[in-house]
Amino acid sequence: MRTLLSVVFLSISIVAFAQIDRMIINFRPAFMKRSQLIIQKDSAGYTMSIKGEQVNEVVPINSASISRISDFLPTYFVEKQRLDSIEMKEEEIREEQRKKGVGVYIANLDGITIRGYVFSQQTERGFEFWSPNKTSVNYTLMMLYFDLMKNSFVKPQTINYISGLRDYFPK
C-alpha cells in the first residue's frame, strides 16, 4: 500500500512540476547575511535573482537551465515526505527523553537554514531544513541550485557570496 501511494504521489508530482512558474529559496546562514534566490517565469522566459544585504543580481536563464531541478522535484518531494515523517517521530522521542532528563541536547550553533517554495499552475510546495548531510535529498537539491547559480551569475560579489553559502554544505 505504501509503495502504491508513493507511485501515485510521484505521478501527481511529475505532472504538477512539469511547468514551474516560480521558485524561492531563503538562505539563512549562521555567520553570513541572509539572502533570497528567486527563479521566476514571465512572458520573456525565466529570470533568476539573488538579493540580500551583500548581494543583488538578476540574470536571464533559459528553461533548459532549470530542467535538472524541475526533473528532480517530484522525487524530492516523495522522499522528503517519507523522511519528514521519520524525523518527526525521532524528534518526538528526543523530546520525551529531554522531558525525562535523558541524554544531552546541543543546539545548532553553526550551519544554514534553507526554506524554499515551488509554485506551478497546479500546486505550491514548500520545504525547510537545516544544514543537510551529503547523503540526503536536501543536499542533492541544493547542489542542483548551486550548479545553476554558479553557471548563471557573473558579478564577482555574487560569486563570492555564493561560494560562502556553499561552504555551509559538505564537500
Image (cartoon, grey):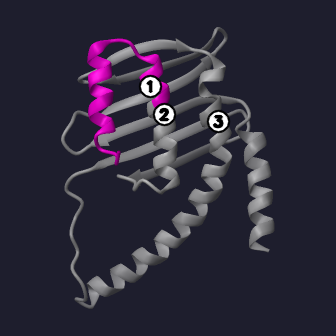
Look at label 3 and name its amino acid: Ser
Q: How many C-alpha atoms fall within 10 Å of the one at disc 1: few (<14), some, or many (≥20)?
A: some
Q: Which mark is residue 149?
A: 1
Taking depth in this image into account, of 134 and 79 the one nearest to the observer is 134
User: Residue at the spot x=34%, y=80% of the render?
Assistant: 95
Residue 20, horizontal then vertical, whole percent: 66, 30
Reply yes or no: does residue 169 show up in magenta: yes
Query: Where are the magenta residues, as a range?
Result: 147-171
Q: Main secondary structure of the magenta part?
A: helix
Left or right? Give the position of 104 relative to 120: left
Residue 87, horizontal then vertical, whole percent: 47, 70
Kindly identify which residue carries mark 3: 70
Residue contact at pointers 1 and 2, CB within 8 angstroms: yes
Badge 2 marks a residue whose secondary structure is helix
Reply yes or no: does residue 148 show up in magenta: yes
User: Residue at the spot x=60%, y=23% of the render?
Assistant: 65
Taking depth in this image into account, of 35 and 154 the one nearest to the observer is 154
- Disc 1 and disc 2: Cα gap in Å? 6 Å
| Quarter of the image with the N terminus in it | bottom right
Residue 74, horizontal then vertical, whole percent: 68, 47
Numbered circles on residues, count: 3
Kindly identify which residue carries mark 2: 145
